[in-house]
Amino acid sequence: MKTGKVYLVGAGPGDPGLISQKGLECLAQADVIIYDRLVYDRLLEWARPGAEKIYVGKAAGEHASEQDDINRLLAATAKQGKTIVRLKGGDPFVLGRGGEEAETLADEGIPFEIVPGVSSAVAVPAYAGIPLTHRRLASSFAVITGHEDPGKEESNIAWEKLATGVDTLVFLMGMRNLPEIAEKLLAHGRPASTPVAVISHGTTPEQETVIGTLADIVAEVERRHLAPPAVIVVGEVVRLRDKLRWFDNRPLFGKRILVTRARHQASALSKLLRQRGALPIELPTIDIEPIADAADLDRALSDLKHYQWIVFTSANGVDAFFQRLRHLNRDSRALSNAKVAAIGPATAAALAENGITPDYMPEVHTSRGLVDGLRNRNIAGQRFLLPRADIAAKELTKGLVRLGADVHDIAAYRTVPAGKAAAQARQALLSRGIDVITFTSSSTVSGLLAALGDGREAINRAGIVCIGPITAEAAVRAGLKVDIVATEHTIPGLVAAIERHLQGKKEA
């Protein structure tokens, strides 16, 4: 059997956006991914379907696998002819024991490649607003392990040279040994007034930074109950943090926000939330499925030339409409005789992906706004097609009928509760301290309630932000207290509403 190949890939320090393009390409082609504790779970989503994932994480005092076991696992799996990604936090060759794993592969004659990663030694201080070098303050820096091999008879660290011979010192894996690190540096001549930063969970929305000096940093860290993993930075450059901090002063930094959109839509909202510093917790309470019986939809699609208007109220409706149209071997030319309306920008964007520019989009992106905008368009007697969810509210249909339109409201897709939502919802709401719950449609309200059963009290303990008035009305009818409704009924508008809600809590 032909021997496989191992890619030792640096996953970066925590922020999944810091992995390299080559690292992602390796993940996408791997048969087996062997990954560490500090690897962000979202990176595993890049694995191809069917790839085997093996966790070998190590933390102080608790090892899923010993290093020798990991080395043997890499070699044995490669000898099965498989392509393996060994996914390691930070950079494989910077205090990551990647050198030992590469040695094992070399000794076994197994082909391997090193894919460097962004080391936490550089990235974490940068995310805390601390440059390791600065023309006025530091011309050198050193990266030091804060946790040497306990099997050594004596330390390999030359404390007497290190303490005063390098401007900036960066210690990795040193949280438990912080008292000893401070003591050694003081004993070998580093001034007690030297600034120190200890940065926990760096580059993630859980990042926390404690600032002190060599004289008091141990007490400050204990007072703040800081938890590993952490990076320790010692040197005058720490004084620049107040001026240069950028990551942990963003408007939603550290806030836990429950995203209840359908699974395939959650990423867009989550991405915006991360950009604003939040920790989105994706809990898809609904799934989108094709309708079981598409006969009514197929008849409407075969008769499009007899409709004067086609109104789309969601990107899901657009996707379902065009998927079914393609199933019937037709394309966007079938819409040539009709005007097309989109309820808002996200729906318009979905239409654009199918080559359609809407003829009309209301200024207020709601069913009510759409009807109000059509009042002066002389639509009496005109045929309207509304391809929507099977549980869509009837306000739009009734409004158009009152204007004299002949409305065909046809289910284009089903909205159903997501399969594993209940346990995840309870854990997130009861254990993880959710700050805000987002609802983007009436179905996400009913989906979360269905998942929780009698969990209204847990939901109401968090802030509730709705994308628009119809969604808010559904939440209120369900016994929930709505804190704020987005002024602009879009995903960016929803994020802005979350900021307003949290800002209001600060000012209260």
Image (cartoon, grey):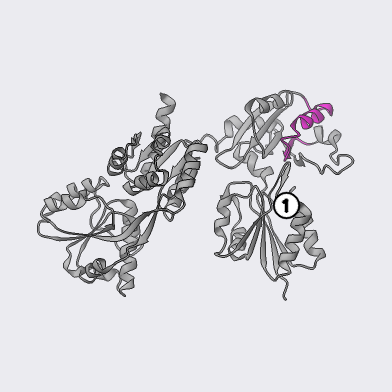
Residue 393: image location, x then y, percent: 25, 50
How many circles with numbers are drawn on the protein?
1
Q: Which is nearer the eye, 166 or 466?
A: 466
Residue 416 horizontal side relative to residue 71, left or right: left
Residue 175: say if magenta.
yes
**Is residue 228 found inside the magenta-colored segment of the image?**
no
Residue in the foreground of this view, choosing between 122 and 70: 70
Q: Residues within 10 Å of mark 1 (few under 14, many from 20)?
A: some
Residue most extreme to the right: 153
User: What residue do we see at 72% from left, 75% from top?
Assistant: 2
Left or right, 6 with reference to 45:
right
At horizontal 85% and vertical 38% (from top left) the residue drawn is 158
x%, y% of residue 246? 55, 37
Q: Residue at x 87, y 43 (%)?
A: 152
State left or right for residue 446 relative to residue 241. left
Measuring from the top left, give residue 421's x and y in whole percent: 45, 49
Examine the image and state in which quarter residue 341 appears. bottom left
Q: Which residues are magenta?
A: 166-191
The residue that label 1 is drawn on is: 65
Instruction: Look at the image and tell me whether residue 197 can be seen.
Output: yes
Q: Is residue 282 visible?
A: no
Name the residue type under label 1. Ser
| Residue situated in front as seen by the camera: 300 or 236 | 300
Q: Secondary structure at mark 1?
A: loop
The relative height of residue 312 versus residue 373 in the rendered view (above or below) is below
- Asked if residue 500 is positioned above or below residue 339 in the image, the reply reads above
Q: 270 or 261, which is in the foreground?
A: 261
- Looking at the rendering, in which quadrant would you find the N terminus? bottom right
